[in-house]
Amino acid sequence: MDKQCSRAELDQVMHIIEAGTFLEEWDYALTKDGNMILEDENEPAMSDDLAQLIAHDRLMNAVSSDHKTVLLKKHRINWKLPSAAAAAVLVLFTGWWLFNTPVTSQSDIPPGTSGATLVLGNGKRITLNGSKSGMVVTSTNLRYNDGTEVEGPSTSSDSELYSAITAAGNMYMLTLPDGTQVWLNAASQLDFPSRFEDSSRVVSLTGVAFFKVAKDKQHPFIVKTKGQQVKVLGTQFNINSYSDEQATTTTLTEGSVEITSGKNKKILKPGQQGILESGGSIAITEIDTALAMAWKNNKFIFENNNIQSVMRMVQRWYNVEVIYTGPLPDAAFGGKVSRFSNVGSVLRMLETTGGAHFRIEGRKIYVSK
């Protein structure tokens, strides 16, 4: 920021912010502006988040009704103030944001968290620790990524079938016995053996998962979903097989995979998506893989999505019930927002299109045109 802009330019900036577009560029600009403050040796150290808050504060206080040219005032928040004063700054900023947004809510809904349930071959259910970064399955034990053992599993000399299940509002990361890493999205299930002993490494998926497959040319890795299977040797790809979506999609980011459905076979290259259509046919399209990978990168990215597609994502991650009142909004929605945000932030971004309105009551979201 060069510390000055015209009223029209400032209005345009505010419109961009409200529309939820160019978020990465905006985030970069605010961080850069905030970091200018950090370079001042008289200022105490602070995180990027606080730096961005300062930059936001500068912009919000830059509006002047008396001048055509608006100087971005060089405010400085004294972070050495008592905690009550610092809290007041945050409250004022939050109040401004909420005051300027039309989403009606009795209480906001926090985002999903890390967590899953592991079901052993004998039916025993283990609640996996959500504070851990993931779980590792070995031939001898189950442990978390930090090396601590998972409490409760019974070891067996024979291979048994495990099921990792995420509820709505949860996601989890697993490392399978062969070293393959799997990120499991909300409301999903992965079935896999406690050890791979056959000529192929076979798992079954319901829902959405991203796979980073350990290379083993002698033992192909196969993911089975409803109506298709995906065969790989070593690669990275995302599969969306939610039962309430119109089609199963496989998106390749690295390597090569073979999709089979009945007698139909297709080979995917990086940057392509395979779409399993009704009747078992497989369509191949070029795609921006960032869209399919957004959930793993903790983002919602919408690009010409209809309201039902958008709200299915919201429903799974925030574990809410979505209720449509009156005619369905017919707008196409676009934008980008963090999955770490409360649901109100997501709905506010969607409302900027003017195509939908939302009301939150408990864990129910009412959608109207």
Image (cartoon, grey):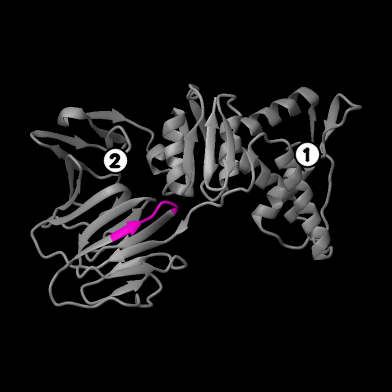
Residue 21 in view (yes/no): no
Q: Earlier in the sequence, mark 2 or mark 1?
A: 1
User: Looking at the picture, does residue 135 appear above or below residue 190?
Assistant: below
Give the secondary structure at mark 1. helix
Q: Position of residue 232 (x, y in %)?
A: 19, 48
Q: Quadrant of residue 292?
A: top left
Question: Which quadrant of the figure contains the N terminus?
Answer: top right
Q: Amino acid at mark 1?
A: Met
On the image, numbered disc 2 is attached to which residue?
243
Q: Residues in magenta?
A: 164-169
Q: Nearer the viewer, residue 225 or 35?
A: 225
Name the side, left or right, on which 111 lies relative to 5.
Answer: left
Label 2: few (<14), some (14–19) or many (≥20) C-alpha neighbours in 10 Å: few
Q: Nearer the viewer, residue 264 or 325?
A: 325
Q: Position of residue 273 (x, y in %)?
A: 29, 34
Indicate yes or no whether the magenta region holds residue 149: no
User: Looking at the picture, does residue 237 appear above or below residue 16?
Assistant: below
User: Looking at the picture, does residue 15 appear above or below residue 228?
Assistant: above
Name the side, left or right, on which 325 lies relative to 186.
Answer: right
Q: Nearer the viewer, residue 219 or 363?
A: 363
On the image, numbered disc 1 is attached to which residue?
60
Q: Nearer the viewer, residue 65 or 99?
A: 99
Which residue reaches farthest right? 66
Q: Amino acid at mark 2?
A: Ser
Q: Position of residue 244 (x, y in %)?
A: 32, 38
Question: Which quadrant of the figure contains the C terminus?
Answer: top right
Marks 2 and 1, how far apart at CA? 45 Å
Q: Are marks 2 and 1 in contact (CB under 8 Å)?
A: no
Q: Quadrant of residue 158?
A: bottom left
